[in-house]
Amino acid sequence: MESTLSLLELLRSGNLRARDRLIERYLPILHSWAHGRLPSRARSLSDTEDLVQITLLRALDHLEEFEVRREGAFLAYLRRILMNAIRDELRRSANSPHREEVTEAIPDRQASLLDEAIGRETMETYEAALSRLPEETQEAVIMRIEFGYSYDQIADALGKPTANAARMTVARALVQLAEAMRERLG
């Protein structure tokens, strides 16, 4: 299987099949990650699949802004674009009136305002702490925790010699993340 880095280089040289292969590779990964991150109140304007496709198109249309460093850097770049697309959609849905049908069906088990606030605060703390970490550390956390990559996949993406070396990188990254979150909360 071709590496993401080689596909990006092929795409930059004008190979459109490389673009298709990148989309095929990252579409299911991003869709799985994004599933459920867009609250139901915002889904009437756009759904997860739309946001994922928009993310991939934005990323591939702006490759000149992306500096190829490591295999895992592109996934972190895509995640950042998708998070921004989700935030934009949430802002858009907050500013538009939404209609809810009244039915006798079992109510949707949406989080209470308190649950949403606590969850939002935790996510903001996580995002802020993550952004303070070095890029490779961020990539290790994102690949393992958010995308569920195996240690072998992380080793390949980060250029580590073994899965065990990737496991140690992730372990250290999680300690750094926890410390950064504690500092932000404390």
Image (tube, helix red, strand yellow):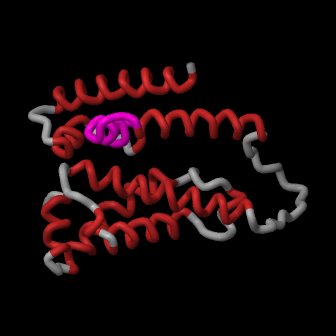
- Taking the image as shown, residue 80 lies to the left or right of residue 50, namely left
The span picked out in magenta is 132-145
Residue 90 position, x and y percent, is 64, 58
Q: In which quarter of the image is the N terminus?
A: bottom left
Depth order, front residue of 28/73: 73
Occupied quadrant, residue 26: bottom left
Closest to the observer, 68 or 55: 68
- From the top left corner, tell me how far across and down residue 111 is, in percent: 73, 41
**Residue at coordinates 12% horizontally, 32% vertically from top-left?**
162
| 136 over 69 or under it: above or below | above
* 27 displayed left or right of 15: right
What residue sits 34% from the left and 55% below the top?
Answer: 77
Q: Which residue is drawn at 46% across and 70% down?
A: 54
Which corner quadrant of the image does residue 155 belong to? top left
- Rendered-image quadrant of the C terminus: top right
Between 105 and 29, the residue placed more toward the observer is 29
Classify residue 105 as left or right of residue 61. Answer: right
Question: How far from the left and from the top, in percent, is residue 62?
Answer: 33, 70
Characterize the magenta stretch by its predominant secondary structure: helix
- Residue 28 covered by magenta stretch: no
Give the number of marks: 0
Residue pictured at 58% horizontal, 33% vertical? 122
**As drawn, which residue projects farthest toward the left?**
161
**Residue 143 x, y percent position in the rendering:** 33, 42
